[in-house]
Image (spheres, rainbow, N blue to C red):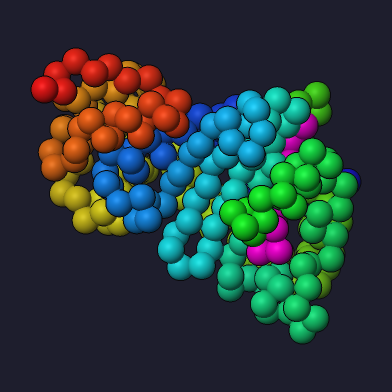
Amino acid sequence: MRDWLGTAMVDAPVLHERMRVLAALDIILSEEAWLRVHRYHFNIFQPDMAWGSVDNGAGDHLHVLFAKTGTLIKGFDHESPLSLHNREDGEIYPGMYDEVPENFMKVLRKHDDVLNREHVTFCLWQEERAPGWKAGSWMELAMAEEDEVYASGGFEFLLGYIEATPEGYIDWAEGYYDIQEMSLTAVTEIFNNTPVTADLIRRLNPKRDVLAALNELQQCGCAVERRGTD
């Protein structure tokens, strides 16, 4: 087990909140779940575990497991030389899961159909009582074998989808969802955990089925208010 040597990471609680917020915004902007890039579920895989994910629709994805004991980040950049599909032996990059806490490995093995255990080009974790991010031996090996720009396995590329500000999300969403002039005030309210109302949904997406959106938002742990849904 080594300290994470890549780009500096925020602590797990900050990451957790950002992924929940971005998933809520995607729910509001898109009725079609398959079109959404950011997703979030809680009480999934095991009690008190949350799962945030990013899927850009181009073969790249990010999975983050949030548990009471810690947090695991696993990503897959299909163009990375660390991908098993780009390696001559067709195997997971050596050391990728070295010393990953067993409670997370159990979840990865049991839910392989969803979490794609073999599709991995970077993996790191943070334990509750040891807040620094850790990684297996794969990082040192990749830094020795690969060009520096490829050694992190696409970490910066995929974490780039986790926008930290309302302005950053708007810049991305207006291009991806082909939206004109999103309301900065409305997006900021979501970032600030303001309970989501019918009015807030309509300000962001006038065509959205408000009741359906509120139901989905509530299922993913967002605070909602149902006044004004008639």
* Quadrant of residue 11 within the rendered picture: top right
Q: Give the image location of residue 35, x and y in percent.
A: 34, 56
Q: Residue furthest bottom?
A: 88
Residue located at (78% from left, 73% from top):
91
Q: Nearer the viewer, residue 7 or 190?
A: 190
Q: Give the image location of residue 170, x and y in percent.
A: 30, 43
Q: Please tell me whether residue 99 is drawn above or below residue 165 in the rendered image.
A: below
Residue located at (16% from left, 23% from top):
229
137 sits left or right of 75 in the view: right
Q: Give the image location of residue 104, x and y in percent.
A: 75, 42
Residue located at (83% from left, 40% from top):
101
| Residue 165 seen in the figure | no
Q: What residue span does the magenta drawing correspond to?
A: 117-127
| Residue 116 seen in the figure | yes
Q: Nearer the viewer, residue 190 or 201?
A: 201
Q: Please tell me whether residue 214 is drawn above or below residue 112 in the rendered image.
A: above
Question: Which quarter of the rendered picture does the C terminus lie within?
Answer: top left
Q: Please tell me whether residue 7 is drawn above or below residue 59 in the rendered image.
A: above
Q: Give the image location of residue 150, x and y in percent.
A: 66, 68
